[in-house]
Each structure stands twice: as structure tokens, then as C-alpha cells.
Image: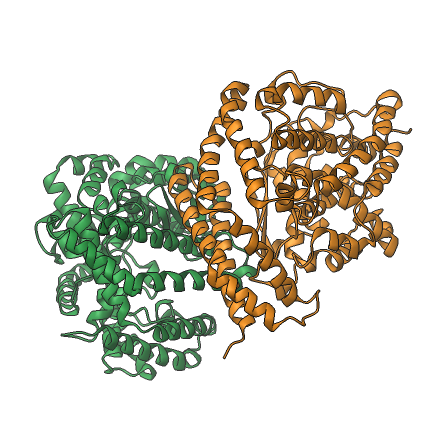
Chain colours: A orange, B green
Amino acid sequence: MSSPYQNLLAKVNEIHDLEKASGLLMWDREVIMPKAGNTIRVQQITTLRRLIHQMSTSDEMGEQIEAAAAELADAPYDSDEASLIRYLRDQFAEARKLPPEFVIRVSTISGQANPVWVQARAENDFASFRPWLEQIVALGQEMAELYGYEDEKYDPLLDKFEKGMKTAEVRAIFNAQKEATRPLLQAIQERGKLVDDAILHQPYDIDQQKAFAHFIAPKVGYDFSRGFLGTAVHPFASSFSRYDARITTRWYPNFINPSLFGTLHESGHAIYEQGTHPALARTPLARGTSSGIHESQSRMMENVVGRSWGFWQAYFPVLQEHFPAQLGHVDAHDFYRAVNKVQPSFIRVEADELTYNMHIILRFELEQALINGDLAVADLPAAWNDKMRELLGVVPPDDRQGVLQDIHWSRPGFGYFPTYALGNLYAAQLYEAAVAQQPAIAEEMAQGQVTSLLAWLGEHIHQHGRKFTPAELVQRATGRALSHEAFVRYVTNKFSSIYEL
Amino acid sequence: MSSPYQNLLAKVNEIHDLEKASGLLMWDREVIMPKAGNTIRVQQITTLRRLIHQMSTSDEMGEQIEAAAAELADAPYDSDEASLIRYLRDQFAEARKLPPEFVIRVSTISGQANPVWVQARAENDFASFRPWLEQIVALGQEMAELYGYEDEKYDPLLDKFEKGMKTAEVRAIFNAQKEATRPLLQAIQERGKLVDDAILHQPYDIDQQKAFAHFIAPKVGYDFSRGFLGTAVHPFASSFSRYDARITTRWYPNFINPSLFGTLHESGHAIYEQGTHPALARTPLARGTSSGIHESQSRMMENVVGRSWGFWQAYFPVLQEHFPAQLGHVDAHDFYRAVNKVQPSFIRVEADELTYNMHIILRFELEQALINGDLAVADLPAAWNDKMRELLGVVPPDDRQGVLQDIHWSRPGFGYFPTYALGNLYAAQLYEAAVAQQPAIAEEMAQGQVTSLLAWLGEHIHQHGRKFTPAELVQRATGRALSHEAFVRYVTNKFSSIYEL
């Protein structure tokens, strides 16, 4: 006789296997599949998604969860069992709030809006995308109502990506960071020692870029024996188990950054998945707990480690070996400064560490205004440009480099953007706590080594998967709630030194 | 209101999507997945297989099939609808004959036996594999009993791979071919002009092999815009729709044949899938009708086209450009003769066109003896060697090059081997009929072109997918039942000329 928990686990394993099969259909679509296969592939994914939704939201599943909860009422809060039941209960309740009709409508409208956005961006034609965006905003509003909220309408959208976090909390942190880093940016612009990053824009042979990517990813802890590096237009990480967590990168023939920092970024994501505890395998706990915490791990490897002086002091000679003509004559420290150049710009994904969060704060504020009905889609381009001027002091010359740049609004993905900036803040706070608890981490980092850092992250973050909410995890790991302070200290120290302020 | 047939089709589409998801999990395992991912991947595949089995064999499915059959009782035999119902009825009845307990037992024992076989082959140790093979033979016997049979116990096993074909029929054809080609082999060995194939065994740069594979596959009709060429230790073709039919190849650094003819072989398989009619999409009819007919398409491209003089007259200059040091000085006709060298050998997958079927006939006869209980596993190695002497005049020096060489007996895959030889016979008969109906085919082939051949195959074979049984398809396409005669004419003409008999 199996216990209620064992029965539940068997069902959860089965659903998880289907999730991963669906994930592989999607990974393959981006990395391997010929374009012609797309129509039928979408149907295959839809079938799996429908089946998963059916199984996860069935009355039987609800009963199984409650039976297991009753059986394990005394299980400690941080046990795998109690954590799984907590997670399943929450997800079950959330999923049941969306009627199947609504889910299909979201999927249909998003599917139609996406190609319109692609073309609108290519043709710099916001007007053609506008009616679709209006529908998508309406869907976002409807979704917020369906999920329900106590304080702000944006709360349930944010909650989908950052469980338990409130809009007001994010707003307070973002505002504090905005004010605290403004003088630093001003100082850099007014009296910083100039940084020249022309060396990054040279012809870089793609095979050599690939070879270096394979060399450098393991240096931040990515385990290729449990991974794979593929090519994708929009890079991402994707895992099918802790034993198979993959990364993708894009290769630009005349610019080294995308492959270099893209590889480190996706490695950070994948290391998180590779580090989930084996006991969580084949359950939904076997992945990163939230978009923000996930992003903290990618930004940790891309920036805190991958744009540090210790790292390039150690590995720039190897990079030079791959590109003797381009970098043979370059001083390691000049390279380090080049990859840390601060400059307000139009495009989020190209932004430096200091100005990146401003791009996010802009989107966070505009999304709330849209969802609350305070901003009409028709007025969005002008609002975008106003905020760019306010936050970054630059205004894009056209909508392609402004309001049309991101894919996120071609589906009702509201609530996701803030997690990018939260990732940067989490990363700084986690790193500061790690060094405080384990001073060897800083010493190793000065040599480009991450062994102790990885051990700390593994213990405090990775192994737990989704057992805890982001707030719980950060509290446990750093002894305090998330704030902007560590990030401000981090960028102040780093850029004061680079810009000799 | 949807009709019973529409309801059935919706369910069939769903099951088919799961089949293809399962197929992708397997494709990915061979081509991309890190080895470490295997344990969990196997569980993911098992979950999908179990779900597919459940859905395909449910009482509800049986009722849906019968309701649709009643609705479409008047549909013409060769309509898509009637063909699908025929196919589903048969598959449903067959699948219900195997109790779930038996399916699990087969899967478990096969899973355990496979690594034992791998090691036994590596260590040339039949004794260690023998107890497993005994279990597998017993499973094969049990399977035959579960499916049931009228004439021979081997019939239901063969039927799984070659629907409707009887053991007695295959035996008669094989025996006739064996007798008919024996004098040709003898003549080649006694008085054929010597063929030297040393040029094939040279260092061949793997990147150049890959480049040539990408060049040559479209020349036999493979559509890369609906495909992908990957690398696999044991090459295979796999399709996820007619818009995404993939091939794999292996690359030997010192031997050009495996990648060259492997690519053409798998292209033949994939072209079949790419050619299934769009109206069959997302149904089980959207694939080749049987293992034997599938093999006829691969052998058509590998041998009938890919080892023809017209083909190499056309493309050898391009191959020379890829390998000037290896082939620059070689005469095209000498290359053509080299790739057609006839020589009895130990290993099936390395056999030439004339002796290949002897390897199959050997296995076909031994499989029947095992299944009928006329041959004990303990006596199998000696029986193998005796038959090698009888059929090919050579005896392998050890079991590694003998009875242990193939993977097929590490699971109860009895009945599959004969379809390899049937494929060669079908190919010859189809080609002969195609040329008789459309003489332009032969003229084009003399120039290395396959446009008209592909059109003929598309019309008579590919588009039909699984609508007809192999026997029906061959009868419709060639006007007669399968026989050995076209094959005998084909090899006699070809090798008499090559060996100047």
C-alpha cells in the first residue's frame, strides 16, 4: 500500500516528466528544429501543455494534495515534503483561478500579436502594433482580476514571477536605488577617466569565440558533463534535469561581448539548476525558486564574477591566445575597463551594470500605469521617451530603439521586467553576505577563482531549488530582507575605482 | 457538434503529438543530451510511453474507433479516413493482446540485458550474455503466444514490422534469392577483375566529410529546409513531422564510407517521411508503412542511386574538390568500382550489396529456430558459425565478429532482421517498375539526377504513408507481389559489368 504522499509524488513525477518533454520541444525549436517544423511543433507543445494543465488542476489532484498534507501535517517546514506540498497547494489554487477559456485566449492572442510586434519593430511602426498591445494590456488587467489582489492590481502579476513580493516593496527598493546611484552616474559622466571600448568591436572569428566559450564557462562552475552549449538568436538556459542543464549563446562576428558575457550569464542560470538537490529530482522544486533569484545567479556569473578584475587578470591571457591579432597588444586592465564602460544607452540588453536597472525601473513604472489604466497605450511611446530622459538623460531616436525593443509586451508578460533588476540587487546582497561569512571567497575572486563562492551559493541557494520563496531564501542566506544597499556599495566601489573618482 | 470521426481524430492527434514528443526525447538522447542525463531521460520517456499506451488501449478509444467506423462504413478503401480506421483497429487489437505487466517486463529485462550485451561484445564473452539471451528468447516466445498465430510462431513477430507478411512467404523469397545469386558470387570470386578499395581507407578530414554530406544529401532529394543532420554513434533517421525529418551520420577519420553512404541511407529514410501527404499530418499514417518498405527507400538512395555509375560520374569531381590529396589522382570509375567491391565478410553493416542479404538470411533462419525452440541459446554461436560457412564461405574468428555483433537480440526484437533484406528486394522491384513506367528515370540516373525517380516514388510510395500494407503498396506500385527476381537482375547486371564477367 502506498501512502497518500507517495501517490501524490508519483503523479507529480509524471506531470514533471511531461513538463520537461514540453521544455525539450521548446528548446529544440529554438536551437535545432528547421523553421518549417514550427506549425506542427506548436501543436505538439499545445497538446502537452493542455494535458499538463488538465492533470495539475483536476479535482483528483486537489484531493491528493490535501490527503498528503493531512498525512504530513507534522513535517518540518523546511523538509522536502512540506515544501513540496506548500508549493503544490499554492500552484493548484493559482492555476484554478484561470478558466481554460482565458488560458486559450491568452495563448491565441499572444500567438497572433508576436509576429505583428516582430514586424512593427523591424519597420519602426508602433501604430500597427498598438491595437494588439491594447488587447494584451486588457488581458493583463483581466488576469490581475482573475488572480485577485488586496493592495495593488500589479501585485498578482508580479507574484507569478517573484512569489510573495509586493509592488510597494519593489517600488520602495527601486526608488531608493535610483536616488542612491544617481550621483555616481553623474560623477562618472562629469569627471570619470575616459574608457575606450573600441577593442571589443573588432572582427572576432566565431569558431574561436566558441572555443573560448567552452573554456570559460567551466571557470565559473558550469559543468559540461551535465550540459550543452547551443546557438540561439535569443539566448536562454533550459534544463531537463540537474544532470542536463543547457545554455545557448549568440555569436556576433564583429563584437565579442554577446558570446562572452552571454555564455557567462546563461552559465549562471544553468549552474543554479545543476545545483538543485538530487532529492528534488522529477518534482517542480527541482528548479530556481523565482525569476529574480534565477537572474541573481546569472548576473553573479556575468557581472560580479565575469566583469571583475581578478577574473580577467586570470583569463585575459587565454583570451589573447584565441585572438592574438585583436587583443595581443591590449593591456588586461584596459580590457577590464572596456567591458565595464558605463554609458546611458537606448537598448536594455546592451546596458552596463550601473544603468541597466534604470531601463527596468522605466518598464516597471510604465507597466503599473498601463495595468492600473492610468496610461493609454496610445500615449505609451511619449511616456517611454519622457522616462528615458528622466532616468537616463537620453531619448531614443525612434520607437524601434525605444518602446518596441522588447518581446515581453507581445504577450501579457507584465510583472517579469522587475525581476531583472531584482536579480542585480539580490546578486550584490548575496555576494556581500557570502564574503562576510567566508572571507576566502574574496581572496579567491581576486585570483579569478570561484570554488568557495560556488560552495556558498550551492549551500545557501542552489540546493534548495524552489523549497523557499525568494524572501525566505534571501533572509536565510543573508540574514536580512532584500534592500538596495549592497548593490549601491558594490557599484560605488567598483566604478569609483574604474573611473578613478 | 463534432462527428465520431472528428472526435476520434482529435484524440489520435493528441496521441500522435505525445508519440512525437517521446520521439524527440529519444532523438535528443542520441544526438545532444549529455550522458549524465540518461537516468532521468529514461523516466521521462517511460512516462510518455505509459501515457500513450493508456490512451491508445483504453476502452474509450475502442469505442471511438468503432463509432467512427460505423459513421464511415461507406468510405472508399483507399480514403484517408477508411485507412486510418483500418490502421487504428488493427493497432488497438494488437496492443490489447499484451498485458501491461508483460510490456513492463519486456522493458525491464531489455533495459538490463542491453548493457550486458555491450560489455559481452566488448570482451568477446558470449557466456556472460547467454543467460540474458535465454530470457529474451523466452520473452519472444511468450510474445508470439500472446499475439497468437495460425501457421508459424514466428509470424506474429514478423507481422509487427512487416504487416501482413508471413514467414513462409519470406522464406520462399529468401531461398529463391539465395540460390539465384550464389553463382554470381562464385563467378566474381573465381574470375572477376580485381577491385581495390584502398583509396576509401585514408585519412579523411571530418569537417570536409560534413561539408560533403551537406552537399550530397540534397542531390538524392533530402530537403534540409525540413531537416537536420546530426551526429550519432549508431546512425538513424527520425521525424517529428513531414516538415522536420532528421538524419544522423557517424564520421570515421580514416574511412569515408560510413559518412558517405550512411548519409545517403538515412536521407532515403527521411525523404520518405518528408514525402508523406500533408493531409496525414498528426496521425499515425504520417510515416513509412513498414520497416521493409522504409528500408527500401534508404537502400534506394544508398545503393541503387548512391552506388551507381551515373551518380559518381556526376559528383566524384565535387568529392575530389573536398579531398584533393586523397582523391585528386583517382579515376572516377575506379572510385565507383571501389565503393562496389564485393567480398564476403563477418560484419553485416559493412557488407556489400550482393552479400548483405546472406547476413540477413542467416539471422532469419536462426531466429526461427530460437523462437520455435529448435535451437538452444547455448548452441547459437556454433550454429552461427556453421551458417556463415554455408552462406558466405567465411567463419568469424570470434563471437564479437559473429553472434555478438548486433544490438537486436539485447531486446526481443525478433522479426526485424528480415526487413533489411526485404528492403533490398523491394528497392530493386520498385526501381525496375519505375523505369518501365517512366523511361526518363534511367536516362536521368545515368547523369546522376533523381528528379523523375523522386516524383515516381513520391506518387507511388511516399505520399501514402501507412495507408496501405506493404503488400498492397507493392502490388499497386509494381503490379505484382514481391519477388526476388528484380533484385537478381539488378545485381547480375551491375556486378557482371563491374567485375567484367
Q: Is residue B162 among the parts visible in the rendering?
A: no
Locate the C terminus of chain A and report the quarter of the image it occupies: top right
- Which residue is most to the top? A397
Query: In this image, A347 relative to B405: left or right?
Result: right
Residue A251 image position (x, y, % from top left): 60, 35
Residue closest to the far left: B479
**On screen, B339 above or below B35?**
above
Rendering quarter of residue A84? bottom right
Picture coordinates of residue B488, whole percent (x, y): 15, 56
Residue at screen point 60% across, 44% down = A148
Image quarter of residue B271 = top left
Given residues A51 and A253, the one toward you in this image is A51
Left or right: where B225 falls relative to B66: right
Q: Nearer the viewer, residue B19 or B37?
A: B19
Horizontal and vertical percent for residue A146?
55, 43
At which x and y percent is residue A484? 81, 40
